[in-house]
Amino acid sequence: MRHGQAARALRAVALAHAALVLAQAAFAGRYLGGDAAGLRLHERNAELIVALTLATWRLPRADPGTS
């Protein structure tokens, strides 16, 4: 994977991860506000965060010595 492609992929993953983490707080707030579905959303979102983290961890690394 070229350096530019790796940087774009990392940026996309970081943005997705940030959005999912922010959504976690919103889903927890829904549950605490009395909406039972908020707990299920919170759980599913946590699973997505873990899956995204594990997938990112397994991405090929760009070699900084190549251009």
Image (tube, rainbow, N blue to C red):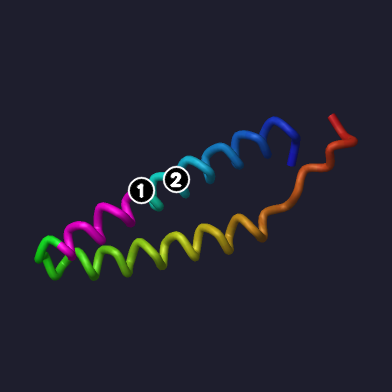
Left or right relative to 32: residue 4: right
Q: Residue at label 1?
A: 22
Q: Is residue 2 above or below residue 19?
A: above
Give coordinates of residue 8: x percent, y percent: 60, 34
Residues at badges 1 and 2 in contact (C-beta under 8 Å)?
yes
Judged from the image, the secondary structure of the residue bearing numbered disc 2 is helix
Q: Residue 66 got which mark?
A: none
Crowding at mark 1 (Cα within 10 Å: few <14, some 14-19, many 20+): few
Kind of residue sitting beneath label 1: Leu
Residue 57 falls in image quadrant: bottom right
Q: Quadrant of the C terminus?
A: top right
- Between 8 and 32, the one lying in front of the other is 32
Give coordinates of residue 36: x percent, y percent: 13, 70
Question: Range of the magenta residues?
Answer: 23-32
For the point 75% across and 49% down, which residue is it? 61
For the point 18% across and 65% down, which residue is it? 31
Give coordinates of residue 56: x percent, y percent: 60, 55
Q: Identify the residue at the far right of this view.
A: 65
Q: Is residue 21 above or below residue 33?
A: above
In the rendered structure, does residue 24 fall within the stretch colored magenta? Answer: yes
Cα–Cα span, label 1 and label 2: 6 Å
In the rendered structure, does residue 43 fall within the stretch colored magenta? Answer: no
Q: Residue at label 2?
A: 18
Residue 45 falls in image quadrant: bottom left
What secondary structure do most residues of the magenta stretch adopt? helix
- Between 66 and 26, the one lying in front of the other is 26
Judged from the image, the secondary structure of the residue bearing numbered disc 1 is helix
- Between 66 and 20, the one lying in front of the other is 20
Give coordinates of residue 18: x percent, y percent: 44, 45
